[in-house]
Amino acid sequence: MDNTLPTEFDIIIIGTGLVESIISAAASRIGKRVLHVDTNDYYGGTWASFNLKSLQEQGTKPNEKQFENERCLQIGNDVFSIQDFSEKWHIIEHNEKENVTQTPEDNEKQLVETFEDKVTIQDESKEAKPNVNETKENSFSRDSLLNNSRKFNIDLVPKLHFARGEFVQLLISSNIARYAEYRSVSRVLTWVNNTLEVVPCSRSDVFANNRVSVIEKRMLMKLLTSLDEDDDNYKDNQDKTFLEFLKEKKLTPNLIHFVLYAIARSTDTTSCSEGIASTKRFLNSLGRFGKTPFLFSMYGSGETTQAFCRLSAVFGGIFALDRAQVGLMIEDDKVTKVFCQGQEICAEHFVLGAEKIPKLYTEHLKVNSYISRAVFITESSVMPSEQEHLTLFMYPAENGKPIVTVLELGSLTGTCPKNLFLVHLTAKQTTTPQEDFKHIIDNLFQFNDQSTEDIRKPKILWSCYFSLPETNSSDLKGTNHPPNLFVADGPDLDLDYDLTIKKAKDIFKQIYPGDEFLPRAPDPEEIIFGGEENEKENVEVTDTLQKDTTSLNDNN
Amino acid sequence: MASRKKILLKVIILGDSSVGKTSLMNQYVSRKFTNQYKATIGADFLTKEVTVDDRTVTLQIWDTAGQERFQSLGVAFYRGADCCVLVFDVTAPNTFKSLDSWRDEFLIQASPRDPENFPFVLLGNKVDLEPRAISAKRAQQWCQSKNNIPYFETSAKEGLNVEQAFLAIAKNALAQQNSTIDLYNEFPDQIKLTNTQKPSGSGDSCAC
């Protein structure tokens, strides 16, 4: 196959992180000729999702290879990439001792069965089927997890979406929503008085919650209604903390906890205006999909960058991943061309993901804060129940530890195999990821290989820690970089993508000031044909389809 | 027991650049063909209703949007496919040689529950052109070696066999869905964000 790229574009984007991908879609959408390249062979950069094996390889991956070419400035730096990656197994490698009487072949089959439904796995020629349930307890081994590696989609940067937030609105208004599917978060938990509690989000939650008294229910309703309607709250309480504000409203400690830590995701020192704004953000997204305000992307947050890239491709953007040698060619203080595996490709504007900034420019850039991340594979939920939950768990700040956002994902999210859970921990780094999360593990989890056993706590089968630079406006000011080179920030700590969209939009507006940012993309039928009888027919088909999926949503 | 629920089947078309993937889609859905080759722009996915064994099913046929050109199809493209259509150009031997890697790539990326029996369909396109490089026999042999994949010789230009091929695609995709989804719905209650979202009743919109 011919592997040569065209050599002239309007804009070249290097890196497939989310900011870059949104810019790619937006530029392509207004008819610009877009070349989008990445040195990785996967989409997403520091925003990617990996299967289990490929995530493990992140720890051992060598840095980008240097290549000899004095005419160009090689892209890539170590400052803005994933840092301090470590991972550890807490289960045995093979699982032989429990099934000594069986042949190795039977054994293997059985291990697979703990993940799969029996329909596709059962071998009809065999009369005696092993009973899965009997050996289910602790039957996981490294081999059995690795055999299911592709059933894991592990996010570097897990995100949730407010049902009426900017991201969801953008997906809908730009018609990119058709490339992705979502699940609603089914419960929000918090840690109060050394126990896990469900945060009442909806009427039905409040009824089901016997920890909240009738009087408290009224108080909570009154407060939330007043926050939602009354803007005077801002003006009168400017100097207060949100905690002081809530105390003045004479809420019980129980309710203050729910509102302050779980709904507003605040700390004791959060300002009143900030707390009210966060509470409103939460309230505004209630009641649209499911029981909580949040959605999670099926198969993980890494799908999102691919949805934007697809839109870019549909409108003519050319994509080339896995390009080993990429560099910038600079003339008269402007980037004129990109060197790409022996080719020289010119364009007017250039966008780089933060981790692709050439080392020359990063020398002056300092990362001011990091995101602590941990990922656990567990064999049960922190709060087991009959149906599988998608859980957001806000762990309040305490004793110098940061607020920790915990996301527990089951197999219904398409991010892990059946009978397992994927737990994501995210926080603003204070020391190291291990230290930032230690108290949560002590309180809620246990490692499968530790000596004492507590039947109430989920067992961690595999754990992994890393840090991500929080590249909040890592612009190149003061680095004498070329003016037609734009840097796209990496991940941030926001629960949703609001900040990300803003950053992408800012760069887009700098490059194309007069153009509309991601107007609604026409439906496929509208692009390919015009004024034909068939068109009408097709549009009707999609309309009924949409109705159908909508009615499905209402059952949530 | 037949369910009354509307059936939507996701079909993806794979093959080297310029074998006619987009043309086949367009010919099938709109009975149109253009000789002008443009590396795919604007082709996204098309939908068409077909009747298979008295059931109305909607085929949602996904184009590669040109991302195959430099081997840059992301895993998201492969998610949830019910059938995979492989296409080669009967006048271009290289496009036939690539079939193995396209099939492997699909099985790796889509990781279907039952890879042995996942429905593929092979289309040898451009049979209206000369000279022919890959004989029907050779293509059929390849199909036999891959657990009897159905093979059709098509011409997107003349509309030859296109309808029949897609009917077979619909049948196989439906059979695949029947054997898995009805017994075990892998991901129920997924949410598709659409404009037509009904505003929900006031019931749950208040926090209490």
Image (tube, grey):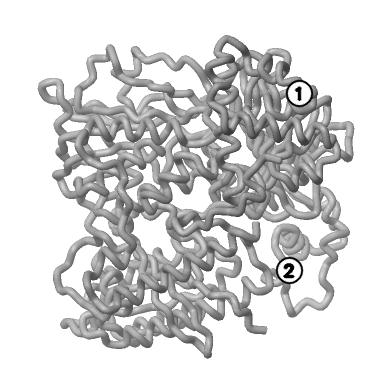
Report if residue A413 is visible in the image.
yes
Q: Is residue B125 left or right of A422 when viewed as pictured? A: left
Query: Quadrant of residue A472 in the image?
Result: top left
Q: Chain of mark 1?
A: A
Between A556 and A128, the one lying in front of the other is A556
Q: Position of residue A436 (x, y in %)?
A: 66, 21
Q: Is residue B97 left or right of B181 when viewed as pictured? A: left
Q: How would you rate the neighbour count of disc 2 (Cα within 10 Å): few for under 14, some for 14-19, many for 20 or more?
A: few
| Whether marks 1 and 2 lie on the same chain | yes
Q: Which mark is residue A251?
A: 1
Kindly identify the residue that appears in the image at 44 percent across and 53 percent down.
Answer: A177
Residue extending farthest bottom: B54
Q: Position of residue B37 (x, y in %)?
A: 17, 67
Name the N-terminal-most of marks 1 and 2: 2
Q: Which mark is residue A118?
A: 2
Report if residue B125 is visible in the image.
no
Q: Amino acid at mark 1?
A: Leu
Q: How would you rate the neighbour count of disc 1 (Cα within 10 Å): few for under 14, some for 14-19, many for 20 or more?
A: some
Vertical placement of residue A502 versus A252, above or below: below
Kindly identify the residue that appears in the image at 57 percent across and 46 percent down.
Answer: A295
